[in-house]
Amino acid sequence: MEALKGNQKLLHEAVENYFELAEKENFRERKYTHFRQVEAGHHRIEKREVWTIPVSSLPGLPKQELWTGLSTIVMLKSERKLGNKTTQEVRFYVSSLPNNAEIIAKAIRSHIKSG
């Protein structure tokens, strides 16, 4: 699992653009999985939603040949409410894991907690 950041600009933009279009079309005619999780405690509520799409469903990604074993692209949307303050974040990942949003969400969450 690799978070896409500014140093992978072309790949990041391609994945972001693909998910933006998919969302506008409500993921119509796309092979995807979705997982939503809500956690509450210590005066906060955290919501995380993960969408995954197999790379085989995409047109070629920039420099895809550099990502050995790449099989899935991922979008994570998170929202955290603490008191009256709400923060939102969208992150993108590439993964060699299978196209399963629940499994990938758990992998991301365990990496965040341990990382």
Image (cartoon, rainbow, N blue to C red):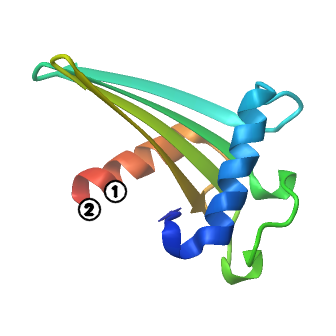
Image spot of residue 112 (x, y percent) = 30, 53
Q: Quadrant of the C terminus?
A: bottom left
Q: Is residue 83 above or below residue 96?
A: above
Q: Residue furthest bottom?
A: 66
38, 8: nearer the viewer: 8
The quarter of the picture where residue 43 lies is: top left
Question: Residue 66: x and y, percent?
Answer: 68, 83
- Residue type beneath disc 2: Gly
Residue at 53% over, 37% down: 102
Tag 1: amino acid: His
Q: Which mark is residue 37?
A: none
Q: Is residue 50 left or right of residue 83?
A: right
Residue drawn at x 53%, y 63% is: 4
CA distance for labels 1 and 2: 5 Å
Identify the mark at residue 115; answer none if there is no mark. Answer: 2
Q: Residues within 10 Å of mark 1 (few under 14, many from 20)?
A: few
Residue 62: x and y in percent read 76, 72
Front residue of this view, candidates 68 and 44: 44
Q: Is residue 83 left or right of residue 69?
A: left
SS at mark 1 in the image? helix
* Disc 1 target residue: 111
